Image (tube, rainbow, N blue to C red):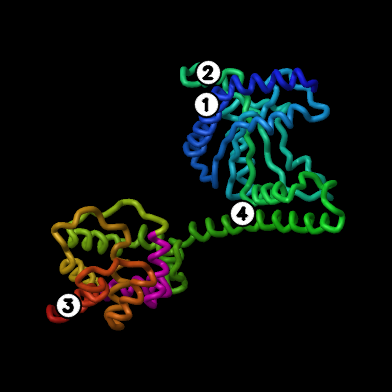
Amino acid sequence: MDATSAATIQAEYDARFGQNDDFRRVCEGLIIKLLDDAGYRVHSVTSRVKGRDSLAKKVGMFGKDYKGLRDVTDVVGIRIITHFEDEVDRIGGLIEREFAVDHQRSVDKRRSLEVDRFGYLSLHYVCYLRDERLQLAEYRRCQGLPCEIQIRSILQHAWAEIEHDLGYKAAAGIPTPIRRRFSQLAGLLEIADREFKEIREILADYSNEITARIADSPSTVEIDQVSIRAFIEGNAANTELDSQMAAAFQVTLDEGIDDDIVAMLAEMLKYAGIQSVEQLGGALNEYKPVLVKEAELRNDPAHTGSAIRGVSLFHLFQVLIALKGSSEDLDKAFTKFHVGSPSVEGPIAKKVYSVIRQAAEAVEHDA
């Protein structure tokens, strides 16, 4: 490209920078909404307007002949990073349905990778907003503007970023003694991508069958995040106890189940000696009166808010440690799981330990 044409494109870039930056925000926001509506959870969605120096380098490349800025299809770039490799094609299908794709200038670089070459590449689309969107007032200003949407898995992205940082973008640029090691590493990443996908599928199968296993043979179901969630969701006695404890605390019971809390409950219960779902059900039944009495004793009329689903399991963890050990044991457990905080009257574990002992004595007396 001659210097005059390149200068014209640079001037157009400067004049249209605000419009392209606005288009970038529109595309990023639209993609995030489309992914959310479709139920896709991705690692990240990022966007950028190509830098001025980068544009100058591109339009000045040998063999390139750009007539104007809109011929440079990646001035606006969107990158979608998925967790798994097989999600690249699924999200690619979403992009093809929701955008006007220029297939002649789009490329699946994964397909262009020769079998004896190394490297991780991504799916690239050159896109425009579809005519039906351009009819809407908020999108009319985006008429005719192209963007490049790249989709790659997180491992593909890691490869690309490290390769870029090393300064080598093609196999021919790699010194021969190192090329084989690059090829081996690329193979390992491909295996890792495939293994992560298979682990995801195994976990999905386990989640689907766990409810039946809990019903048929609870002694064989170990305590983990999946089994605790299934127990909270499906065990009627646990749901009833959660409701009783929430009522004793004079708060409402949450409907939703938080995955982070479920994972923490699994670790807490194992720490307290519960190893199987059968043991968990037995312990809840054994200590139910103490749990309810403890909730009544710890009720604070000034307390507002709600109780989590699984609140009975959280208190079972405390009761098991307090009744089988000392206040120091409970304090160690609280420290390990970051429960509570010291107060001016003394460590919270001592107070909880005292209330649990009081609740146990009251239940024994009533019996």
Q: Position of residue 59 (x, y in %)?
A: 74, 27
Q: Which dot, 1 or 4, sits closer to the camera?
A: 1
Q: CA distance from mark 3 to mark 4?
A: 51 Å
Residue under numbered circle 2: 141
Task: Give the residues drawn in magenta, as a range.
Answer: 261-287
Marks 3/2: CA–CA distance = 70 Å
Q: Position of residue 25 (x, y in %)?
A: 52, 30
Q: Is residue 260 left or right of residue 78?
A: left
Asked if the residue under mark 2 is in contact with the one under mark 1, i.e. CB atoms within 8 Å, the reply is yes
Which circle, 3 or 1, is nearer the viewer? 1
Q: Which residue is under mark 3?
A: 358
Task: Identify the mark at residue 22; answer none if there is no mark.
Answer: 1
As for residue 282 lying within the magenta part, the answer is: yes
Which residue: 35% across, 77% down? Answer: 332
Predominant secondary structure, magenta span? helix
Label located before the other in sequence (3 or 1): 1
Disc 1 on helix, strand or loop? Answer: helix
Q: CA distance from mark 1 to mark 4?
A: 36 Å
- The answer to whether residue 237 of the structure is visible from this angle is no
> The disc labelled 2 sits on which kind of residue?
Arg
Circle 3: residue type? Gln
For the image shown, how many numbered marks are present on the structure?
4
Give the label, 1 or 2, closer to the camera. 1
Quarter that holds the C terminus: bottom left
Which mark is drawn over residue 197?
Answer: 4
Please tell me which of labels 3 and 4 falls first in the chain: 4
Look at label 4 and name its amino acid.
Answer: Lys
Q: Mark 1 or mark 2, which has the lower sequence index?
A: 1
Residue 248 locus on image (x, y percent): 17, 62
Could you give the CA–CA distance between mark 1 and mark 2, rounded to whole angstroms? 9 Å
